[in-house]
Amino acid sequence: MHELVGRLSDRIRAFERGDAAAVLDDEALREVEQLIGSPTGRRTLSVPTVHAVAWLHWCRYRASSGGDAWSWKAAVGWFRIVLEIDPEQVPAPIRAYLAGDLGVEALLRAEYALELTQTAMLGTDEAALARATGLLERAAEGDANAGVNRPVILWVLGQADRARFALTDDRRYLDQAVARLRAAVAAAGPDEPDLGQMHADLAGALQRRYEAGAEAADLDEAVAGWREGLRLHSADAPDRVGPQSNLALALRMRFEQLGVRDDIDQAVTLGREALRTATPALRAVVQSNLAGALLLRFRHTGATADLDEAVALGREAAEAADEERQLGCRSNLCLALMIRHMASGAAADLDDAIRWGRTAAEAAPRDAPERPAVLTNLAGALHVRFHRTRNLRDLDAAIDYARQAVAATASDRGAPDRGALSDLSMLLLSYFDIDRSRDTLEEAIAAARQGVGGSANATHPSYSSHLANLAEGLLERYRHDAAEADLTEALALLHRAAHHPSAPVARRLDAARSHAEAAARWRGLEAALPMYRVAVGLVPLMAWRGITREDRQRLLHVSGSGLACDAAAGAIGTAAPDLAVALLEQGRGVLWSQLLESRTDLSALRTADQRLADRLAHVRRQLDAPVSAAAERPRMRASDFDRPAARSRLALRGPDAGNAW
């Protein structure tokens, strides 16, 4: 008998370690039969025997995710005996059930269906998810009579639906998940201990639905949900890093959608807070996420301090990341190094980027979700090096990696990723410069056209690049065929790219300048002048006060060099000399204008609003101070200056108000 009790105990311990087969084995029931002999002999059994048999049936019920009614009844029957001997040895759900809480069985089904869901999400067992959902729905149906915790049931149902969407890509499950998670949040009271996680799960589902092509309102609601989930986490909670990181990622996504600078600044701040409290196990991924936010902000503002910090954080993350996170961290570092090379020209950064990119690509399994991004980043770095060295092997390798990235995204999503297609088109255009093959050019245009696609991604900042890439291919074909339709379409695409509301200003400026130059060449200066004016107007936005003077000078040199002269020449060519002078002064006097704006006499403003004048004077002194190493204060000072400056224009009502700034 002692030996049989020991065997059952071993099976129970194995189950607690995750081995469900140990208790589901038919041999386990035969051991129970040998141990108890017959039902009539139960009262003469020892306490260890009763404990072992009761716990085995309970574990079998748990292993079935609440679907084995016989094991449930057997466990309840045996634990009735244990309850008389030692109530503390009875599992809390069964103790509640025996005390008269008839809802506990339904709640158990919900809880164990969640376990099944979490397990199934790691694999491809959609049938298991279907069983879990059925159990949850039956539990929810019994809510009114059984007193089941309705918010919890709805919450778990939403989790099951979300998991089924992940396995099937059936949008109906995602919509249902959002509806049920909304209902769970609405039904939960303020004292619900899981309310913060409910908000977070709803936010995650909304964010995923936004990624799948739904309305921007989903992303706004997701950001609000992440904020509420974070608020409900105490400031010293050890798991606060997760909500901080999730909110930061949602803000990054919304910044890419709308271009509101406060979103990316908040994402960086949250990333820094998360990094301060991250455990060693999470530190690498938090570093990589923060590096991504800083890199995104650099691409929109041009602040090299952000870029340098992104590279430093990315390098630490790539060197320290565990095997599970290595691919993403190494590929992100490849991208950051490539962008820094493009900003500074440092050859060592580019070689380092390719080295990290190759390391990531060689380690990426064919089915890894990160693989397309890994291949795309490496292809981009090789493309940049080709332009520097003209080594055709780099271009050949880049095209091969880009084709693999397109194929990988098509396999994962059912259709190629538009960004990967657009990147491939640029590589093919570079190859066309060498082989002059019409087939290469047509393939480049076809890939670029697929990259532009419909309107689903038209609000994303990268869309302006996709438009410009297609325009470049069409202009190349126009040079050979002189088909007016190609030129007309190319100019229309560049016009859209230049006016894209959330694209980086430098990218919009490049599109406006390309439009003006193409129009001037083939349609005359009069057709070019409107877009020259747009381009010159974008220069001050690109070289804004929130970055250092050195960064502003660099951006003006890279993107603005010669622009004012070209625009002025266009104005002169259309017999508009006054406009020519204005464009020339506007384009070449950006820094000087900013300096004058911050030196305006505040006497009139002090009469109208003393506090506002004092605030402007304070911010002006801060802007004059040396730039800090963190590079955060200059950005905040610039924002502080712009807002009071705008208010000051409203405060001044005298005859000099229009000339105050």
Image (cartoon, rainbow, N blue to C red):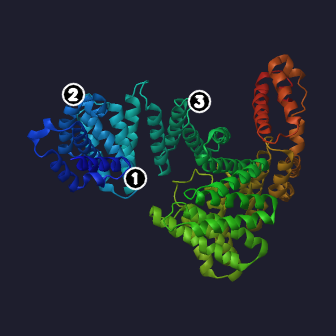
Q: The residue under label 1 is which amino acid type?
A: Met
Q: Are marks 3 and 1 in contact (CB under 8 Å)?
A: no
- Between 530 and 57, the one lying in front of the other is 57
Residue behind mark 3:
235
- The extreme front residue here reads 2
Residue behind mark 2:
84
Point out residue 599 in the picture as x, y percentages from the top left corner: 90, 32
Mark 1 or mark 2, which has the lower sequence index? 2
Element type where label 2 sits in the image:
helix
The crowding category of the residue bearing disc 1, from other C-alpha atoms within 10 Å (few below 14, some 14 to 19, many at least 20), is some
Residue behind mark 1:
121
Mark 3–mark 2 distance (CA, rounded to whole Å): 44 Å
Point out residue 346 in the picture as x, y percentages from the top left corner: 81, 63
Say if residue 470 shows up in the picture: no
Instruction: Determine which quarter of the picture holds residue 658.
Output: top right
- Between 396 and 105, the one lying in front of the other is 105
Q: Which numbered tag is attached to residue 222?
A: none
Q: Quadrant of the C terminus?
A: top right
The crowding category of the residue bearing disc 2, from other C-alpha atoms within 10 Å (few below 14, some 14 to 19, many at least 20), is few
Q: The residue under label 2 is which amino acid type?
A: Glu
| Residue 123 against residue 638 in the figure, above or below | below
Q: The residue under label 3 is which amino acid type?
A: Ala
Q: How many marks?
A: 3
Is 411 displayed left or right of 468 in the figure? left
Marks 1 and 2: which is nearer the front?
2
Mark 3 or mark 2, which has the lower sequence index? 2
Marks 3 and 2: which is nearer the front?
2
Point out residue 9 in the picture as x, y percentages from the top left corner: 30, 46
